[in-house]
Amino acid sequence: QLQLVESGGGFVQPGGSLRLSCAASGFTFANYAIGWFRQAPGKEREGVSWISHSGSTTHFADSVKGRFTISRDNAESTAYLQMNSLKPDDTAVYYCAAYKGPYFVPPPVMRDYDYNTWGQGTQVTVSS
């Protein structure tokens, strides 16, 4: 059974940091790019960042560039999203997802229909 499980969300004050984890099982994690998306209340889901299957290529949305980093540990079948200098606008449910095909490098424009295995999401709330 293909599965992704996010963790690490929580409540943080503006300027704080959180590290999200995305643990995979049921498929060969090392063969797939992983993307992080987020959805705020009343807004459409948006792509935040992705990392290629090898970890050699990454991409970030302009809204998080310079504040977020993405990494992966293929031996542990886990991807990470390190979020620093958090802002209230970062408040959302964060999802990780596996790209639709092995070894593909995703395009810069993140379209959720290009990702076919999703986690359940983890809530991130940034507020003073």
Image: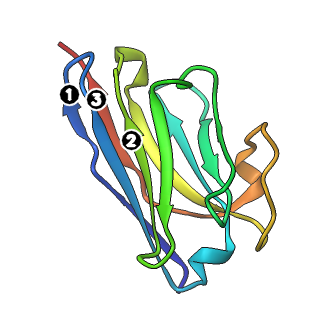
> In the rendered view of the protein, which quadrant contains the C terminus?
top left
> Nearer the observer, disc 2 or disc 3?
2
Left or right, residue 71 beside residue 12: right
- Where is residue 82 shown, x and y percent of the image? 39, 41
Q: Secondary structure at mark 1?
A: strand
Judge whether 70 appears above or below 11 on screen.
below
Label 2 vs 3, first from the N-terminus: 2
> Do labels 1 and 3 touch, CB within 8 Å?
yes
Looking at the rendered structure, the kind of residue marked 1 is Val
The residue where tag 1 is placed is: 12
Judge whether 120 appears above or below 28 on screen.
above
Residue 120 picture quarter: bottom left
Q: Residue furthest top?
A: 128
Judge whether 41 appears above or below 49 on screen.
above
From the viewer's side, name the closer residue of 38 and 101. 101
The residue where tag 2 is placed is: 82
Real-space Cα separation, disc 1 to disc 3, in angstroms: 6 Å
> Do labels 2 and 3 touch, CB within 8 Å?
no
- Where is residue 13 shown, x and y percent of the image? 19, 20
Left or right, residue 102 beside residue 27: right
Looking at the rendered structure, the kind of residue marked 2 is Gln
Q: Which mark is residue 125?
A: 3
Label 1 vs 3, first from the N-terminus: 1
- Where is residue 52 shown, x and y percent of the image? 68, 58
10 Å crowding of disc 1: few (<14), some (14-19), many (20+) = some
Label 2 vs 1, first from the N-terminus: 1
Q: Residue at x 45, y 25 (%)?
A: 67
Q: Secondary structure at mark 3?
A: strand
Q: Residue at x 63, y 21 (%)?
A: 62
